[in-house]
Amino acid sequence: MVRSEMILQLKNTARWDICIVGGGATGLGIAIDAASRGYKTILIEQTDFAKGTSSRSTKLVHGGVRYLQQGNVKLVMEALKERGRLRKNAPHLVKNQSFLLPNYKWWQGPFYGLGLKIYDWMAGDLGLGPSLFLSREETLERAPTLDPEGLKGGVLFHDGQFDDARLAINMAQTAAEQGAVVLNYMKAGRLHKENKQLVAIDAVDQLNGDAYTIHAGCFINATGVFTDHLRKADDPSKEPVLSLSQGTHLVVDRKFLPGDTAILIPETSDGRVLFAVPWHQHTIIGTTDIPVDKPSMEPIPKEDEIQFILDNIKLYLANDPQRSDVLSVFSGLRPLVKGNASSTSGLSRDHFIETSESGLISITGGKWTTYRKMAEDAVKVAIQAGKLEDRPCVTHDLAIHGAMQVPNYTDHGYYYGSDWAKIQALQQENPSLAEKIHPDLPYTKAEIVWAVREEMCMTVDDALARRTRAILLNAGAAITAASTVAHLMATELKEDLQWEQEQTDAFCSIASNYVAK
């Protein structure tokens, strides 16, 4: 997946069957769906793939236990089916994660246990394992750092866990392998219409300023939290469909949750669920749910969100994480479809599809787990609107790039799947590339070189936030590693010392907001 080759295809193609705007989970899913059906497909993304919401999740591929509690059976059923499919199609990135729901009141065991048995039943053949009732002793054996005071027992259940940005990068590669052109740093501009129908869209390369006009038979708006911006550009009379919500997570050392079992707190002081999840030999704790007025590419965690998470998790862990223990803090925005709920936590996680008078198809809402179904639905709408020739969807069993069974999810590099052997070969060819980019991070220099050569990594932020997850695992270490990474990238991209310095400075500015001050 080489950007210059993609640009060449853009220049040499007069008209596309479908143009997708937005390179997050939904847009990339649509690119895979459309290209695998044989449509001439192009996707443009104004920054990097999964730069926004799609790299800032709780890292769960789940049916949504709390959506069942809200009575949204349809969403849960659909998500459980998609969870099973994703586990089969991307086994290097999606793994079975056991969760513990601790019970501190006598009624919690039977109440939550019954709900989780229903959850198991709904998953059917695609289930990851049966839920179990645990005694107090069994619960502490599974999660020895749980606060033992008042603990009655627990319920164990299974859901999926994944690396969101790595999946997005592998999805971009999958789309390219299916024949799609996928371009990061290509910003959509003016819309062109003939007889009130959308026929073309301007795009500007954010890396060199080159301008293009993309002609297509079908245009899909998959811009996530920016969906209303493109809808307004198409039709200024459109009312917004989104209510934005911010979710913040803390990353701490795995000593706070040393086992392989995640913890689900069913109800915090604001009525949300709280997770503590093992991830890349660290622990992610989150999330919050606060309303936000306008979208941002780099949402900044609020002080009260950080304190809220620390205050709530200490009620359940024997060893309370302190502010000084937080290695990184990150926030993401949820594109929630407007409704009548009194808070954003009650808004629908279902997806929304709209076809405008000009023919622009907008899709938003949903969640990572259901991206494949959302993509299938979007293409189906385009077919029904006469924008695309009717061809069957083939993504149900389509393997994602890198797919292979992983024997051990703790070995570094498992999340590259079949590409890991090629990265190791790079290190053998040049032993200096086997060096780590920082002592406190697991990543080697070879992974940076690989990201530039094979994964369309164009900036230091791409390298440290999404090709590797350095900024999330240890923001301070990532800042220190930035200059090393900039030099490696500059050598590969044939850039000068000024580029190195600008990239280092730009990344450090972003990463400063990931440090829990």
Image (tube, helix red, strand yellow):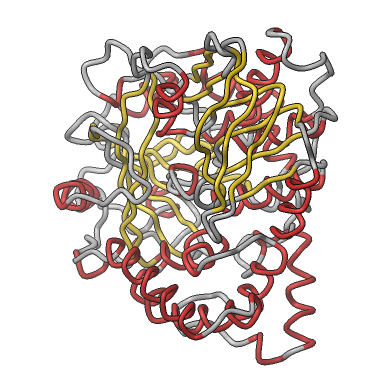
Could you say where residue 358 lies in the image, as x and y percent from the top left?
Answer: 56, 13
Q: Quadrant of the N terminus?
A: bottom right
Residue positioned most to the front: 194
Quarter occupied by residue 124: top right
Q: Is residue 280 visible?
A: yes
For residue 295, side relative to residue 498 (left or right): left
Above-or-below relation of 398 to 261? above
Above-or-below relation of 298 to 334? below
Q: Which residue is drawn at 68% across and 51% down?
A: 170
Above-or-below relation of 180 to 413? above
Q: Is residue 163 visible?
A: no
For residue 445, side relative to residue 138 (left or right): right
Along the viewing direction, whichever of 29 and 147 lies nearer the viewer: 29
For residue 5, side relative to residue 482 (left or right): right
Q: Which residue is drawn at 17% across and 35% down?
A: 269
Could you say where residue 259 lies in the image, as x and y percent from the top left?
Answer: 46, 59
Above-or-below relation of 444 to 81? below
Along the viewing direction, whichever of 94 and 189 lies nearer the viewer: 189
Could you say where residue 455 lies in the image, as x and y percent from the top left?
Answer: 67, 60
Could you say where residue 199 lies in the image, as x and y percent from the top left?
Answer: 64, 22
Q: Residue at x 61, y 10 (%)?
A: 195
Q: Residue at x 40, y 65 (%)?
A: 254
How many marks do you count on the picture? 0
Along the viewing direction, whichever of 132 and 238 lies nearer the viewer: 238
Q: In which quarter of the image is the C terminus?
A: bottom left
For residue 109, side relative to residue 182 (left or right): left
Quarter occupied by residue 418: bottom right
Along the viewing direction, whichever of 501 and 394 lies nearer the viewer: 501
